[in-house]
Amino acid sequence: MAVDAKPSPPWKPIARWGMPLATLLVATIVTSRQTLVELEPAVAVAIAAVLAAIVALMTARRLALPLLILAVLSWSGAKSDLDPGLLVQNRQRAVEYVFGRNLTDAQIAESYQSAERTLMLSLQRQARLQITDELALEIGQARPEGFDAAVQARTTQLRNQTTLEEWDARVERQARRVQRERSGGFFPPETELESLRLYADALLETVAIAIWGTLLAMITALPVAVLGSNRTVSILSTAGGPLPTLLRRVGVFFTRRGFDACRGFNEFVLALIFVAIIGLGPFAGVMARAVHTFGGLGMVCADALETVQQGEIDGVTATGASSTQVLSFAVLPQIMPYVVSQSLLRFESNVRSASVLGLVGAGGIGFLIDAKLKSYNFQEVATMMIMIIVVVSLIDFACGRIMKRFT
């Protein structure tokens, strides 16, 4: 007859689970107080959680991992200065930054005065150039007597040639531009046809950078990935013995470390390097994207080659096929849908990433974004951001349609 196990006292689970939690509470209180150094609350919680996790290893091991996670999150939160309260405190600033601020009547009136001064300076500059050309004066040559008076008279003449309605229209356009710059905000976006053409041309350059960066990476990553997989290297080299096995493992190891090196550098850093080597322009962006994408695609292709089915390899090998034929007809067909999927995903990602390479002179729409941000033309930046989102969405849709043909 079976004997029922003796139930444990109810206080034992409480003690087992309570000791780590009590340690967490006590250690938090102690470390939060000013002792030898002043600790941030989050750091104090991290230290207390580590101490509680150590206690949990001896009493309730299930609590050890959650406590360690709490320690990591608390430490990383303190290290990254997480403060959600700043978002609440600066909510008005955020609204003004995104949607712009309302100008006072005095600021609006001053914008019209500034616009008129700007237009008059433009006429004066035009008059100065005309007088200089008429007198055939060279740069740096002394101006004859009465030059300034002639420039002023020509400025007045150019002003009188403009009708009052046309002048008022110019002042209105310039004043609105000044008001838009002073109010800030990203809305409403820029809609002038001339600007849209400029942004579209820069965006097409960005797409071209992404196309060639992805293509160069794809056609080089797949062959090199064959050398980064133990499965495929063993097919190419069937020699037995310790030395061939060691050489194969060393080759695979260094091939994978090469992939790590290529994708370990941010494309921004790579763009800076290639701009210094090649010079300004989109070709530097192409090379930066190609090297970075090569590392990523090469690694995922090598990992995919490790998962191929051995049955198909044995079937093709049984026909007497060579190593390259086994790779071509038994290995690569198994991973091609995955390779195409990853390549399209990288292409879509490269379009987004290439849009900021222009910040360092590597071509694309990023150069315009940087220039407009520095000149506080946020509404033009909003237009370019919308265009990038639309293009990325179209590319995502097209890539999805292409993927259906491989699945």
Image (cartoon, rainbow, N blue to C red):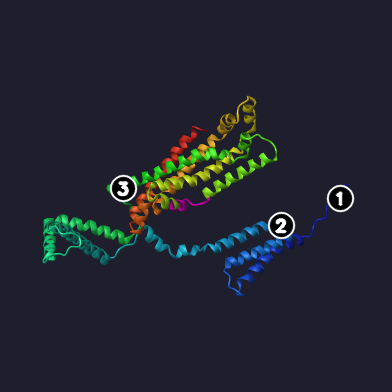
Is 27 situated above or below 385? below
- Mark 1 crowdedness (10 Å alpha carbons): few <14, some 14-19, many ≥20: few
Q: Is residue 176 left or right of residue 311?
A: left
Task: Please report the residue visible at 43 percent of the width from the left and 44 percent of the height from the top.
Answer: 210
Q: Is residue 131 visible?
A: yes
Marks 2, 3: nearer the viewer? 3
* Residue type, label 2: Arg
**Label 1 secondary element:** loop
Q: Is residue 92 left or right of residue 407?
A: left
Residue marked by disc 3: 198
Question: What range of the chain is rendered magenta?
Answer: 264-272
Residue marked by disc 1: 3
Check residue 267 for magenta coloring. yes
Specify the quadrant of the image occupied by residue 164: bottom left
Q: Residue furthest right?
A: 1
Between marks 1 and 3, how big is the CA–CA gap? 87 Å
* Residue type, label 3: Leu
- Mark 3 crowdedness (10 Å alpha carbons): few <14, some 14-19, many ≥20: few
